[in-house]
Image (spheres, rainbow, N blue to C red):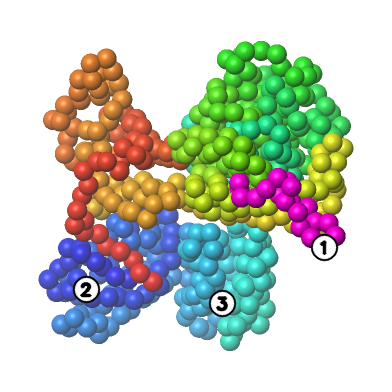
Amino acid sequence: MRFTNCHLPQSISPSLTYTMQVLHAPSSPHLSIQSSKAPQLTWGLLPSVSVNSSPFSTLHFSLHSQRIHRLLWTPHKRVTSRAASVEVGDSSVPTGMAEDDVLKALSQIIDPDFGTDIVTCGFVKDLQIDKALGEVSFRLELTTPACPIKDVFEQKANEVVAMLPWVKNVKVTMSAQPARPIYAEQLPAGLQTISNIVAVSSCKGGVGKSTVAVNLAYTLADMGARVGIFDADVYGPSLPTMVSPENRLLVMNPEKKTIIPTEYMGVKLISFGFAGQGRAIMRGPMVSGVINQLLTTTEWGELDYLIIDMPPGTGDIQLTLCQVVPLTAAVIVTTPQKLSFIDVAKGVRMFSKLKVPCVAVVENMCHFDAEGKRYYPFGRGSGSQVVQQFGIPHLFDLPIRPTLSASGDSGMPEVVADPQGEVSKIFQNLGVCVVQRCAKIRQQVSTAVTYNKSIKAIKVKVPDSKEEFFLHPATVRRNDRSAQSVDEWTGEQKLQYTDVPEDIEPEEIRPMGNYAVSITWPDGFSQIAPYDQLQTMERLVNVFQPSVQA
């Protein structure tokens, strides 16, 4: 544990390093440290530690000059923490040593998406130890059942714990507790239990967008996720052709006045084509209303991923979807032709303005193999150009395969008809990419803007940015640009500088999509603060904060 640039008693050097292992728990607001030469110090930034609602342990140490002479850590028998729930059986050894051994071993396993060990991520649950018998059991609770490396986690956990000299038997069970939407209470009821919403878009018709959307959805379902598909193309719905559910008509719940989706092979489906109306003949505003109703009043239930098959273009319907639905990410579909790239580029720019990250590009109909050679009938480079120009990290090439087209027409997706084929392997890689990127995006968004009470500052780290900075709460409140603070007609500032007390503190900070946060202040005002605006505000410098290093 390192305290850097913080106010310490004169008897303690700011550069002095104390090394210890700390477990996390949400039930205690701070860690207490007592020194024989200084009063009790409370560091608000340190991880929470507790045992059965009482302090986990007290660290007593004596100092002479700048050297530690005595360190006493007294843990209790039962430990409850965010990192793990621990129970230790009766043994002649100190009760704190067994769980420390196991958690230290498990902390060697790093989650590649979060860049943090699985103990700190909070994956280790129900840890039970009987050192007398050499038995250890625990559960690894992941954030998605579609985790592509869950088998690796299970194997590594078995291996690292089994290497402990006193361990004779290890039992690891795997589970998943998908994270709820970060801002669920702000969403329509139908969307509140969907963890991730992914748009599949091309902004050009005929490039295979619906094929990619359907096969991606069934790939995620095969990985163990709960998945739904929303066909947002009212003018030309594709879903009724590409899948073959028994019930091809949507049903209304008369009591709740909600729509019950149809299902095919475990995936929930909504399309205007299942409404018994065929293709729509209506104007744009009416279509936007239909899309909104179909999407937000459907009883989706708990889903890990909702795949939205976006209609072509960048008009009212697309903007309505992007504004009503908190899109986690987007997958872009294109073909090798230059004309396709021009339209796709418009879509990427639209998502960029709406702060929706594009996580992958799928270049469809790239090539075919014949007589031992590979041919590119439509040219090459459109997908690569999208990746390079817009910085999208992943590119997937789909070959020309008659079976891929035939499976779409037959009502059975290719990944279901031939799960071991070349096309299915490409979609499996795409599915892994989507799962990993969505997890990383959620983690970045949930921690982008936070308030630290110990230093009374708002910390900002915008997603996909390496920059981290601090803002004074009063500065943020005074920079509100809503109609309550600024006259919309004259631009006159209604909120005066003196109206905001210098010691004001936010009561709650919640993410608003991928572009802003909602900040609730003591007077009940809810301020929408876009990331772009926060980056332009006057920043605090030389912020003194304690930091923790393992």
The Cα–Cα distance between marks 3 and 2, rounded to whole angstroms, is: 41 Å
Task: Locate the N terminus and report the quarter of the image it occupies.
Answer: bottom left
- Residue 112 forms part of the magenta stretch: no
Mark nearest the camera among 3 and 2 is 2
- Asked whether residue 79 appears in the rendered view, the answer is yes
The dot on residue 372 is 1
- Mark 2: which amino acid? Ser
The dot on residue 15 is 2
The residue located at (84%, 36%) in the rendering is 409
N-terminal-most mark, 1 or 2: 2
Q: Where 384 falls versus 238 (above or below)?
A: below
* Left or right of 352 in this view: 314: right
Q: Which residues are magenta?
A: 364-383
The residue located at (56%, 37%) in the rendering is 342
Return the residue at label 3: 90
The residue located at (34%, 39%) in the rendering is 532
- Asked whether residue 177 appears in the rendered view, the answer is no
- Residue 381 forms part of the magenta stretch: yes
Task: Please state which of residues 3 and 76 is positioned toward the viewer in this rendering.
Answer: 3
The Cα–Cα distance between marks 1 and 2, rounded to whole angstroms, is: 66 Å
N-terminal-most mark, 3 or 2: 2
* Left or right of 277 in this view: 209: left
Instruction: Indicate the secondary structure of the residue bearing disc 1.
Output: loop
Instruction: Indicate the secondary structure of the residue bearing disc 2.
Output: loop
